[in-house]
Image (cartoon, grey):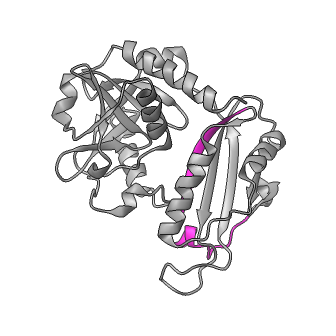
Amino acid sequence: MAYLAINGRILPQEDASLSPLDRGFLYGDGLFETLKADGKRIYFLEKHLERMQEGARFLRIPFPKELDFYNLVQALREKNRIQGEASVKICLTRGRHQDSLYLYAPSSPTTVILVHPYRGRTPADWEEGLSVTLEREILQNDSSSLCRLKSLNYLLYLLVRTRAQEKGFEEAILTNRANEICECTTSNLFVYRQGRLETPQVSCGLLPGVLRQALMECLAREGRPVSEVKLTPEDLRSCEEIFVTNSMVEVFPVGRVDQDPYPRRERTQEVWEAFRTYRNAMHPG
């Protein structure tokens, strides 16, 4: 039997329910964060909660500061008998609809926490790398503030990811109206080009991931700053290595973009090892 938490109350998944009038269901009116836990460590929990808090302030949703997220996650790990790594998802909605289409301040927002076992990528997966395609028809709206929120309005990414899967790829790269690379559907993109590590600028229209920021801080401490630039799909052909980051895979190499292979892993491996040391130092456990 799996367990989850709704508004701080832990209960069996089979007994859990939300109102059909919840704004998250009706309008996608809410936010979410996904992060990794391992034993007593919940990686970058404070950074994820800070980002959710900023998004909640922008959307005028009161943030439930009274909830003890760390201990709730640990209690769910124990209830769900998870021994190894776990994926954690925290959702926040405006709560029950009050017959107004404004972003009003609700009397009782809804918070849901889900914790499930996570099986990471294998060494064979690392050698093969991620298969990625360029999405050329569905474009990111870089002028919208919403693309910088991790909101429950996730249909754009689900649609693009499904289109990639139908073509035989695991991931897709989104571009904006100026033909600039933004991000992947579930991750941020980094490239080694002419010996320099680069990542798309936030202004291109992307969600700046917690792992993206943590990795940039890690490398800056080592004297290897990452350049935030504007990249076009054509620039990818001159890249020596490409990798993605998100809170679950952390750092993972791209093996091909459409039919162009990227077999090298040396610098990506160096980045992963540096980041793992940094991450563990930030979370001594």
The residue that appears at 38% across and 12% down in the rendered structure is 266
**Residue 275 at what x, y percent from top left?**
51, 25
Q: Nearer the viewer, residue 144 or 51?
A: 51
What is the quadrant of residue 161 in the picture? top left
Q: In which quadrant will I find the C terminus?
A: top right
Residue 265 appears in the rendering: no
Above or below: residue 111 compared with residue 46: below
Indicate left or right for 222 with 283 as reference: left
Above or below: residue 103 compared with residue 99: above
Instruction: State which region is magenta.
Output: 17-38
21 magenta-colored = yes
**Residue 229 at what x, y percent from top left?**
24, 39
**Residue 7 at what x, y percent from top left?**
74, 64
The residue that appears at 48% across and 59% down in the rendered structure is 151
The residue that appears at 69% across and 53% down in the rendered structure is 113
Q: In which quadrant will I find the N terminus?
A: top right
Q: How many marks?
A: 0
Residue 134 appears in the rendering: yes
Q: Nearer the viewer, residue 116 or 221?
A: 221
Indicate left or right for 50 with 232 as reference: right
Indicate left or right for 233 with 127 as reference: left
228 magenta-colored = no
**Residue 268 at what x, y percent from top left?**
40, 19
Q: Residue furthest bottom?
A: 99
Q: Nearer the viewer, residue 188 or 122?
A: 188
